[in-house]
Image (cartoon, grey):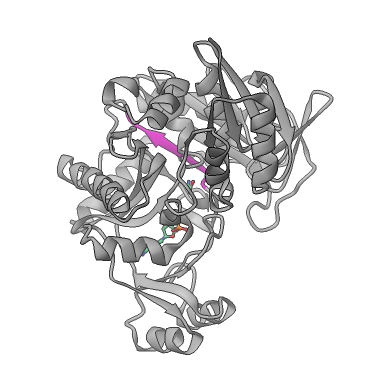
Amino acid sequence: MVMKILLVGSGGREHAMAEAITREGEVSLYAFMARKNPGIARVAKGILLGRETDAKKVRDFAVKEGVDYAIVGPEAPLEAGIVDLLEESGIPCAGPTRAAARLETDKAFCRDMMAAHGIAGCPRYRVFHDTGEAVAFIEESDGDLAVKPIGLTGGKGVRVMGEQVDRNGAIAYVRSLSGNVVLEERLIGEEFTLQAFVDGSHLVPAPLVQDHKRAFEGDTGPNTGGMGSYSMPDHRLPFVSEEDYQKALRIMEDAIRALARDGFPYRGILYGQFMNTREGPRVVEFNARFGDPEAMNVLPIMTTSLADVVCSIVEGTLSGAKAGFGKKATVCKYVVPEGYPERPRSGESIAVGDTGMARLYYANVEERDGSLATQTSRTLAFVGIADTLELAEGMAEGAAASVKGRVYHRRDIGTRELLARRSAHMEAIR
Ligand code: AMP
Ligand code: GLY
């Protein structure tokens, strides 16, 4: 029997999800997208364009097409209660309910949950709802703080004192948020991402990935949604020890257990953003979904079908045997409009040249009469997959460099030099 799966979302991450769902087996994909992603549209049996937070419209589409299961790419529809509504209509989802998704959508909920259950890796933090109190806290602090808006901000909302803002900047930022912030200890170290499939009680980890948030080479320039990422054939990272890895995994498992105990069983994809510090991994944040770009590192090397994983998440029968990953290195590079993220040049024609063996994932790009134009966010992603990081990097770099037009990408992602710098940084911290 053909399995029908609904996918919500329209970026590079969702293109990789669509590909992984339809790669093998008898699967029909139905896609609900904010805008038409040409890559998703090509593999989908049916598509509908609309606001991805319009939960009723998504539900009506799913019911009309008679889908069996649903999976959601971005966080905004989760916060809009899309899973709750679909499940009320008898469509099980590989995604958390609105209450469980607060792990991502409500930074105060996340920290309070970690503190209440004594979960390791929680930085010192305080939640504020009052401008005067938050400002006084900053004035009295030693200045090593991260300022986090409590709600969703598209991953660009955190301002770290000493990095993006000084003390006065932090105070002005707190005022602009009417004092609704979490102020927490500034974590120093190397960041890494651990994504996992979760069925309510079992957790199956994907390979570790490192993302690159800064716009320009050498980790300079403004923060972005992520300029690219890499993973290694052994599924680990050179600056994360076995002990660090086991601690991070344990933190994720503890978070799932704590949520279940509090009455919010978690199903779907759990994304842990960690800072590897002198004291080991600490939690920067949890996300209730795959990362973008990190999904493009792990999904293409899955040795099992994502459609089957969706089934086992929903049925609560997930196991390591059901979600496997090949022993390959991956490098993902995003090509973005000139001026991104602050003043992106949208509507610029681009031409993709010889991309060799790299995979191409469409992101925020318009296709008209077979030609492509930039929009305001990340445009195209290229992923190299090979036995070594060097080979994977060469594939992704060659493909990204082949794109002609008013776009740029980071040449340093996945290079030996960058990795050596990460490892040296970690050594210095320890
Ligand atoms: P988020 O929106 O939570 O993903 O945060 C965006 C970025 O801000 C993270 O990837 C980190 O680089 C940085 N960040 C967040 N929290 C902290 C923290 N407590 N200490 C240092 N950097 C942080
Ligand atoms: N790459 C960061 C995120 O997806 O939140």
Relative side of 205 to 31, left or right: left
Q: Is residue 58 above or below residue 162?
A: above
Q: In this view, does 28 lie above or below 169?
A: above
Residue 393 in the image: x percent, y percent?
44, 29
Relative side of 20 to 240, left or right: right
Q: Is residue 289 visible?
A: yes
Over which residues does the magenta segment extend?
226-232
Relative side of 86 to 303, left or right: right
Q: Which of 143 and 388 is in front in this view?
A: 143
Residue 350 in the image: x percent, y percent?
74, 33
Of the 4 image quadrants, the one containing the C terminus is bottom left
Residue 190 in the image: x percent, y percent?
32, 52
Q: Which of 322 and 232 is in front in this view?
A: 322
The residue lying at 56 percent from left, 12 percent from top is 2
Q: Residue furthest right?
A: 369
The residue lying at 76 percent from left, 46 percent from top is 346
Q: Does the magenta stretch include residue 227?
A: yes
Relative side of 215 to 237, left or right: right
The residue lying at 40 percent from left, 67 percent from top is 108
Q: Which residue lies furthest to the left in this view?
A: 243
Would you identify the image quadrant in which residue 120 lies?
A: bottom left
Q: Is residue 131 magenta?
A: no
Would you identify the image quadrant in which residue 275 lies?
A: bottom left
Total marks shown come to 0
Q: Nearer the viewer, residue 216 or 368?
A: 368
Q: In this view, does 98 lie above or below 179?
A: above
Q: Can residue 38 be seen in this view?
A: no
Looking at the image, in which quadrant does ligand 1 appear? bottom left
Residue 161 in the image: x percent, y percent?
42, 73
